[in-house]
């Protein structure tokens, strides 16, 4: 176990970082931005170093990996507005068709945990590409389930269509002071699929047969696959103390082929024993106290959000005389734009705050010495306040059948608060386990969805037990303060908890001095 660093030890750590011998390929003086912020990690002088890649290309890669994740989340809710026509076809109740969304969410939940060892063996490019290709095959499978007895096969197809999803390369190509915005973009774009899916599903079902929902999804997946073929490069690089990567082929065709088949021309060789250890490291990281605290926040926040998102089709399309809102699929599609607005707000908030606030706190209270817990303070205004209020409003709107705009307001606050937690949570934990970013992403993805996929199976019983949705969503709001309290504990005691319980996997950039000048212009 690791000990907590005392202030004097932290000062020694800063001095060590600034005075230790410079490895070959690194500049003798620390490289800084024009605002005086030290680049962490320090890039080499090699133009092939991913940290030195042009900003435009880094953005292209960020968009590609975000869209790869987006294609999976969108696929999980591709038929969100098609419950009624499918229920007629299969002879099921609409609530039973919502199980297909839970099946898709289960695929997203478990997929990265199963896919990580494969990406360790064959590289991120190959795992992303073939994951999307297999998802395309399963989407075609879903679109062919048109028989009366195909309900079970359809639900299974939704699971496999969402199983193959990759994770990000953000740690490889972005510096510490850029990661907040990068993770905000990645998190929001990947999760906005849950919003866009129901919107297009509603418009499609209103004017065409429900099968078109899946052909639309297939087109998105095909676009992602093409982008991977044309633009994606492996982001690993040989650094002191890390894995040694080969020099990739210079020829475009040779490079594309090596990347997409997982050739050892672009990735280091690994034995299956090493791959197995990488898979097991996910379990160890998932059981570390800081991961449990952040994971519990994700579990509760997204569980409540999924309960709203998954069942909105049932709430809105149920006839008015039966307690619903009597929406057509098209009206539901228009209603779903509230999710677009909340996602846009979360992206704007993350872009403006996710780096600026932690860097300001680092300068103001840490004298320029970094610790990952500064990231968590972004959650005060984005999550801790709006989400519980939104749950209360949403429950009251359903309980007393208030105007659908009140329902929309509650949904907006919940979605905004929930989406805002994802990039901050991932960024914080990745910086607590800097050598295991993919494992962290997979574990948090599991925490995020493992509870939400079960909610459709017991939400009706919960309604009945407390006499309606008002108390149900009110209880959700009160329960939310349990994980909030754990995260607040991490804000102030996180370093001590990490050093005592992180084990050999816990490596961070804590103690690095980020600022060499007195300018505050950046903040």
Image (cartoon, rainbow, N blue to C red):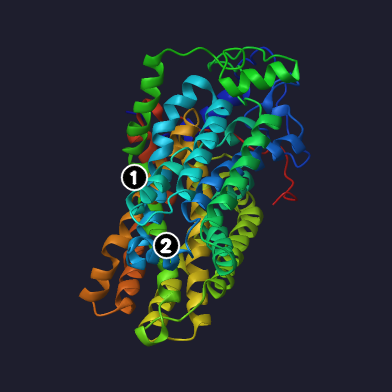
How far apart marks 2 and 1 lie (CA) works out to 39 Å
**Residue 232: x and y, percent?**
66, 30
Q: Secondary structure at mark 1?
A: helix
Q: Quadrant of the N terminus?
A: top left
**Which residue is drawn at the image coordinates 42% and 62% (left, top)?**
86
**Which residue is drawn at the image coordinates 62% and 25% (left, top)?**
234
User: Which mark, residue 223?
Assistant: none
**First in residue order: circle 2 vs circle 1:** 2
Number of numbered discs overlaid on the protein picture? 2
Q: Secondary structure at mark 2?
A: helix
**Residue 156: x and y, percent?**
36, 46
Residue position marked by numbered label 1 in the rendering: 292
Residue 177 in sight: no
Residue 207 in sight: yes
**Which residue is drawn at the image coordinates 43% and 37% (left, top)?**
112
**Which residue is drawn at the image coordinates 38% and 77% (left, top)?**
395
Left or right of 177 in this view: 409: left
Viewer-proximal residue, 14 or 318? Answer: 318
Q: Quadrant of residue 440?
A: top left
User: Which mark, residue 86?
Assistant: 2
Q: Residues within 10 Å of mark 2 (few under 14, many from 20)?
A: many
């Amino acid at each position: 176990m690791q000990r907590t660093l005392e202030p004097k030890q932290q000062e020694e750590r800063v001095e060590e970082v600034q005075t230790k011998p410079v490895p070959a390929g690194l500049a003798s003086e620390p490289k800084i931005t024009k605002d005086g912020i030290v680049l962490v990690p320090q890039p080499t002088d090699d133009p092939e170093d991913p940290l030195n890649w042009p900003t435009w290309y880094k953005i292209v890669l960020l968009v590609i990996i975000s869209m790869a994740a987006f294609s999976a989340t969108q696929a999980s809710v591709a038929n969100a507005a098609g419950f009624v026509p499918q229920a007629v076809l299969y002879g099921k109740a609409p609530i039973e068709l919502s199980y297909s969304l839970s099946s898709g969410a289960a695929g997203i939940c478990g997929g990265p945990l199963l896919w990580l060892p494969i990406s360790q063996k064959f590289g991120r490019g190959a795992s992303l590409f073939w994951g999307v290709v297999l998802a395309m095959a399963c989407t075609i499978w879903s679109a062919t389930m048109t028989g009366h007895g195909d309900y079970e096969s359809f639900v299974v197809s939704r699971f496999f269509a969402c199983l193959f999803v990759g994770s990000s390369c953000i740690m490889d190509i972005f510096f510490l002071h850029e990661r907040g915005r990068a993770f905000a973009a990645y998190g929001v774009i990947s999760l906005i699929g849950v919003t866009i899916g129901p919107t297009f599903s509603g418009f499609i079902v209103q004017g065409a047969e429900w099968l078109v929902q899946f052909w639309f999804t297939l087109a998105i997946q095909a676009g992602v696959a093409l982008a991977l073929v044309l633009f994606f490069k492996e982001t690993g690089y040989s650094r002191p103390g890390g894995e040694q990567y080969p020099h990739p082929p210079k020829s475009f065709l040779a490079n594309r082929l090596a990347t997409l088949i997982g050739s050892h021309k672009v990735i280091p060789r690994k034995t299956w024993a090493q791959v197995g250890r990488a898979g097991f490291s996910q379990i160890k990281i998932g059981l570390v106290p800081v991961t449990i605290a952040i994971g519990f926040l994700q579990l509760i926040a997204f569980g409540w959000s999924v309960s709203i998102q998954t069942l909105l089709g049932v709430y809105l399309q149920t006839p008015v005389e039966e307690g619903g809102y009597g929406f057509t699929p098209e009206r539901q599609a228009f209603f779903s734009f509230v999710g677009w607005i909340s996602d846009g707000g979360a992206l704007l908030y993350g872009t403006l705050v996710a780096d600026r606030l932690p860097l300001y706190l680092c300068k103001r209270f840490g004298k320029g010495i970094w610790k990952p817990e500064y990231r968590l303070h972004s959650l005060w205004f984005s999550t801790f306040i709006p989400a519980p209020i939104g749950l209360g409003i949403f429950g009251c709107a359903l309980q007393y059948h208030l105007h659908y705009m009140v329902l929309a307001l509650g949904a907006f606050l919940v979605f905004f608060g929930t989406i805002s937690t994802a990039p901050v949570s991932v960024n914080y934990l990745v910086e607590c386990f800097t050598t295991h970013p993919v494992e962290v992403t997979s574990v948090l993805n599991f925490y995020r969805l493992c509870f939400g996929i079960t909610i459709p199976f017991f939400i009706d019983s919960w309604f009945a037990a407390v006499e309606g949705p008002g108390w149900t969503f009110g209880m959700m709001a009160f329960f939310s303060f349990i994980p909030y309290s754990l995260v607040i504990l991490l804000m102030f005691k996180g370093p001590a908890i990490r050093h005592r319980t992180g084990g050999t996997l816990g490596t961070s950039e804590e103690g690095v001095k980020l600022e060499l000048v007195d300018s505050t212009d950046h903040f």
